[in-house]
Amino acid sequence: MSCPVCNERKEKRFCPAVHGKICAQCCGEQREVTLDCPSDCPYLQQARQHEKPRDPNSVDREAMFPQVEISEQFLYEREQLILGLSYALAKSTRAGRSLDGNGLTDRDLIAALTSLARKYQTLVQSSLIYQETTANLAHQQIEREVETMVKEFREAEQKHLGYSRLRDSDVLIALVFLLRMALMRTSGRPKSRAYVDFLFAQFPETQSAIAAPDAAGSRLVIP
């Protein structure tokens, strides 16, 4: 039998994306490009293990908000904020499965994080509320979950400290940190879910709340 993707070469390996066998070449060339590969595909997992880290020079510099500085001190002091935002991303991405039968991709997260970062950048620079409208329901879901987390974070500070010290500039820096991580962890292929799977590994589906860093150990990974 010939490969159903190229209709030329002989089929050799089972592809869960097409629910049948395809040739090795199409598997390698079309993986996360035209093939919507599930995260548990053994060939995808094997490829990720041998894939070289993404070259920073291959990423559009402007997409990484180069004007936003991220210090090691900020990462240390605001680790819980970053973990909270990461948890919100994982939660909204899981919820997004009901909006998109194939599941959300790294591009969805990157688009939502970019929109949120622009909003907070405008808020920090001019105190004006910037609202980038999108018709994408999945992106809306991600943005709502992140905004809810920021609101709850401020409420928690208010409860325990008597005031909230979380500034919009802190949220901006944290969002840009996560955006840069997403841009470096994704393979760059259209259907890549490398960053999505990284988030899922950090926050398993059975976990209903963020574990305290001192109880579970730091899960903040510098890209």
Image (tube, grey):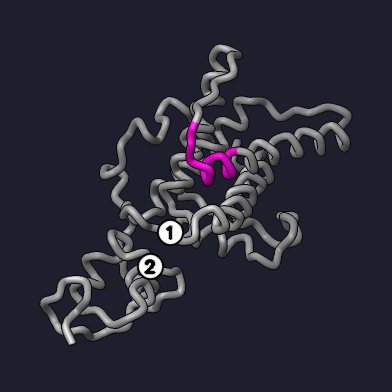
Across and down, in percent, residue 137 comes to: 53, 43
- Residue 193 circle label: 1
* 206 displayed left or right of 171: right
Residue stretch rendered in magenta on the structure: 134-143
For mark 2, does the 10 Å Cα neighbourhood hold few (<14), some (14 to 19), or many (20 or more) residues? many
Q: Is the magenta stretch mostly helix, strand or loop?
A: helix
Please tell me which residue is depicted at 24% across the width and 70% down the height of the picture: 28
Toward the viewer: 91 or 168? 91
Pointer 2 with pointer 1, Cβ within 8 A: yes
* 115 displayed left or right of 152: left
Mark 2: secondary structure: loop
Mark 1: secondary structure: loop
The image quarter containing residue 209 is: bottom right
Q: Distance between the residues labelled 2 and 1?
A: 9 Å
Q: Which of marks 2 and 1 is nearer the N terminus?
A: 2
Q: What residue type is labelled 1?
A: Arg
* 30 displayed left or right of 116: left
- Residue 121 circle label: none
Please tell me which residue is depicted at 56% across the width and 39% down the height of the picture: 140
- Residue 37 circle label: 2
For mark 1, does the 10 Å Cα neighbourhood hold few (<14), some (14 to 19), or many (20 or more) residues? many
Across and down, in percent, residue 30 comes to: 25, 65
Q: Which of marks 2 and 1 is in front?
A: 2
Across and down, in percent, residue 68 comes to: 47, 28
The image quarter containing residue 180 is: top left
Q: What residue type is labelled 2?
A: Cys
Please tell me which residue is depicted at 41% across the width and 54% down the height of the picture: 185
